[in-house]
Image: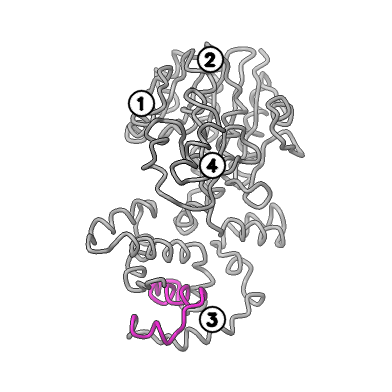
């Protein structure tokens, strides 16, 4: 039987909503500060808090307040089927029976569209303009479901079937991903980082959609490649394996902290063709010296992250300066393009669902850079034997249509 912890869940939820750190980091800090909580108790609290973050607007409507985290948690537990009578001793200061009545009589169809979608007004309005109200609600529902655990096989060390068998022998069976040729998927969350497979560097945790982005770059052996916004290096590691540990792969990022997280992953992977470079900005001298010399450049641009809400529901509730983000994306793409040599390839990608960060940025870039042409992604997908067709030149992925996080990518080629 599940043990309920409404007070601890409410406390942690309030910490996440009022803080600036990502939810997983806040949880880790909270649990360190409460060492008496067992593993199972921590799991129950984390599950409750993530459910509250996903459905915050409907739960707040039931609770009667957007800031009453205790009421939101109780509404969440009630909607999950827990009885008001059993919960009364756990929250003696709350009118649980009234909450239960409101939850029981809730008419979702009468709620404002953004509330039904459990999205902030600004995001619901933009998505509705892009795809219409009905499609927006369906997309929002898929974004508000927990994501599976996707793995990317390190092909420098093994193949998918061999790693799949090894994982199964360790008690973690997985199924092949439908699109990414080196991906495995698990629907259950288990401590995969403790497996010998992980310690041996045979896989990394990486969403299937993210894996497809790297494949669009099609890096070849002995080429010079740049991952312009490498972060902690998920796509960097994939690119290095696709290059069979040959050539030179630069991992650029403005954050030394993010690149530091790449180091242990790099050691596990066995790759030696990666050079991590901390840059001050997109016009850094270390960028300028490579102008016109690079075969392939990936720009995985910093973005709103709206395509990753299945994994990071807390970002819905944080302020986003979209205008600043778009300006930054345009600067980064323009700077990265200077590295590409004639005949080279440039891939611009985001994990955003918003037109402003995707078509808006690439459209502005192409209008100012006639030396680049668009390469339809379907051509690449067919060549890579990936059973996925796109209706337009760009890659557009969503949890609703493809079971992946939401991604956008456009492949560009420098013609002169």
Query: Decide: marks 2, 3 in contact (CB < 8 A)?
Result: no
In the rendered structure, find residue 294 and report the number of the disc placed on it. 2
Q: Residue at x 33, y 32 (%)?
A: 260
* C-alpha gap between disc 1 and disc 3: 51 Å
* C-alpha gap between disc 2 and disc 1: 25 Å
* C-alpha gap between disc 4 and disc 2: 27 Å
Quarter placement of the N terminus:
bottom left
Q: Nearer the viewer, residue 326 or 234?
A: 234
User: Quick one: which residue is furthest to the right in this view?
Assistant: 391
Badge count: 4
Q: Which residue is mark 3?
A: 103
**Labels 1, 3: front one:** 1
Q: Residue at x 22, y 63 (%)?
A: 36
Q: Secondary structure at mark 4?
A: loop
* C-alpha gap between disc 4 and disc 1: 21 Å
Q: Residues within 10 Å of mark 4 (few under 14, many from 20)?
A: many
Q: Main secondary structure of the magenta part?
A: helix
Among the two numbered marks 2 and 1 on one chain, the one whose residue lies closer to the N terminus: 1
Write down the region rendered in magenta: 65-90
Q: Secondary structure at mark 2?
A: strand
Query: Decide: marks 4, 1 in contact (CB < 8 A)?
Result: no
Colouring scheme applied when the structure was drawn: one colour
Q: Residue at x 53, y 43 (%)?
A: 150
Q: Which residue is mark 4?
A: 207
Q: Nearer the viewer, residue 117 or 248?
A: 248
* C-alpha gap between disc 3 and disc 4: 34 Å
Among the two numbered marks 4 and 1 on one chain, the one whose residue lies closer to the N terminus: 4
Q: Nearer the viewer, residue 136 or 243?
A: 243
The percent coordinates of residue 60 (x first, y second) are 48, 73
* C-alpha gap between disc 2 and disc 3: 58 Å
**Labels 4, 2: front one:** 4
């Amino acid at each position: 039987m599940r043990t309920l912890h409404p007070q601890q869940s409410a406390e942690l939820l309030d910490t996440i909503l009022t803080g600036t750190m990502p939810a997983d980091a806040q949880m880790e800090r909270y649990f360190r500060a409460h060492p008496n909580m067992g593993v199972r108790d921590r799991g129950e609290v984390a599950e409750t808090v993530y459910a509250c973050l996903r459905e915050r607007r409907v739960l707040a409507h039931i609770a009667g307040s957007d800031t009453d985290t205790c009421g939101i948690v109780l509404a969440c537990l009630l909607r999950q089927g827990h009885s008001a009578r059993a919960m009364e001793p756990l929250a003696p200061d709350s009118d649980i029976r009234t909450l239960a009545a409101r939850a029981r009589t809730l008419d979702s169809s009468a709620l404002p569209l953004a509330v039904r979608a459990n999205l902030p007004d600004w995001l619901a309005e933009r998505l509705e303009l892009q795809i219409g109200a009905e499609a927006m609600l369906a997309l929002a529902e898929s974004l508000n479901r927990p994501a599976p655990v996707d793995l990317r096989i390190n092909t420098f060390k093994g193949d998918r079937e061999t790693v799949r068998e090894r994982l199964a022998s360790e008690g973690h069976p997985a199924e092949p991903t439908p699109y990414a040729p080196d991906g495995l998927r698990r629907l259950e969350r288990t401590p995969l980082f403790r497996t010998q497979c992980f310690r041996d560097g045979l896989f990394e945790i990486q969403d299937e959609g993210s894996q497809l982005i790297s494949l669009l770059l099609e890096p070849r052996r002995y080429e010079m490649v740049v991952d312009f916004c490498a972060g902690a290096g998920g796509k960097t590691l994939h690119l290095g394996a696709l290059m069979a540990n040959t050539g030179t792969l630069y991992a650029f990022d403005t954050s030394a902290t993010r690149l530091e997280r790449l180091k242990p992953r790099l050691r596990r992977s066995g790759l030696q063709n990666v050079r991590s470079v901390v840059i001050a900005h997109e016009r850094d001298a270390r960028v300028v010296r490579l102008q016109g010399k690079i075969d392939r450049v990936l720009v995985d641009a910093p973005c709103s992250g709206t395509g990753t809400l299945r994994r990071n529901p807390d970002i819905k509730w944080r302020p986003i300066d979209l205008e600043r983000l778009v300006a930054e994306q345009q600067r980064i793409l323009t700077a990265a393009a200077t590295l590409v040599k004639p005949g080279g390839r440039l891939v611009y990608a985001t994990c955003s669902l918003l037109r402003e960060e995707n078509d808006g940025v690439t459209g502005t870039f192409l209008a100012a850079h006639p030396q680049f042409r668009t390469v339809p992604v379907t051509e690449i997908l067919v060549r890579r034997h990936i059973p996925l067709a796109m209706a337009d030149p760009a890659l557009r992925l969503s949890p609703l249509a493809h079971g992946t996080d939401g991604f956008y990518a456009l492949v560009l080629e420098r013609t002169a």
